[in-house]
Image (tube, grey):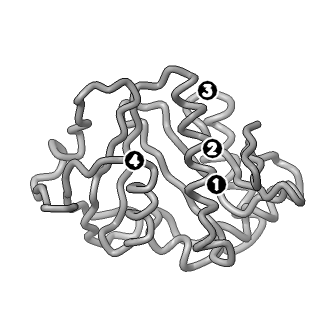
Amino acid sequence: MLETNRLIIRNFKDDEKDIEALYKIMSEIEINKYLPWFPINNKAEAFDFYKERILPKYQENNGYYFSICLKSNNYPIGYITVNNEKSHDFGYGLKKEFWRQEITTEAARKVIEFLIQADWKYITATHDINNVASGKVLKKLGMKYKYTYKEQWQPKDILVTFRMYQLNFDGKNRVYEEYWNMYDDHFVENIN
């Protein structure tokens, strides 16, 4: 468990409270607009999501899937995930009613501190170019833009233009190039 002034950052549990919270987070259309899955329709689907996407990270020690909770009630209002694959892909989501309160940035900074202490070397993150708010969070975290690529995103089957950012913790000048190499339509934008 991690803590900030306002937040508790912890694993999701398979209890009624957390599954209900997961359902509320994952069913919001605006949150899921830029995510690679469709909104969840009920608590049963939320439990399936937990079993299929979250629990394996805990069981296999394959990265992290943290819930973001307010200290006042320890009830999940969002999440931060980072995989332990070569990309070290970093992602997040937050219920709309908590947007524009710097909660995601606060939680993400604490998780980054945790990853640095755990001797991770870097993280990457991508965002749809239409998801401007997510790009702002990445910049606030000190992540640096590396390149842009276009992907036919599944299962939604839509063409998405992604910007790829990276944060190297060890000072090395590395770039994760797998997305660049995987997709023919890639380029570098002039982004300040």
Q: CA distance from mark 2 to mark 4?
A: 21 Å
Q: CA distance from mark 3 to mark 2?
A: 10 Å
Q: Which residue is label 1 attached to?
A: 79
Callout 2 environment at 10 Å: few (<14), some (14 to 19), or many (20+)?
A: many
In this image, 48 relative to 125: left or right?
right
Which residue type does callout 4 highlight?
Gly
In this image, 153 relative to 65: left or right?
left
The disc label shown at residue 142, or none: 4
Instruction: Verify CB contact (< 8 Å) between mark 2 and mark 1.
Output: yes
Residue under the point 63% across and 36% down:
56
Residue 104 position by quadrant: bottom right
Seen from the viewer's position, the closer of residues 25 and 159 is 25
Seen from the viewer's position, the closer of residues 106 and 55 is 106
Label 2 vs 1, first from the N-terminus: 2
In this image, 133 relative to 74: left or right?
left
Instruction: Verify CB contact (< 8 Å) between mark 4 and mark 1.
Output: no
Q: Which residue is label 2 attached to?
A: 65
Residue 171 position by quadrant: top left
Which residue type does callout 1 highlight?
Tyr
Callout 4 environment at 10 Å: few (<14), some (14 to 19), or many (20+)?
A: few
Label 3 vs 4, first from the N-terminus: 3
Label 3 vs 1, first from the N-terminus: 3
Looking at the rendered structure, the secondary structure element under dot 3 is loop
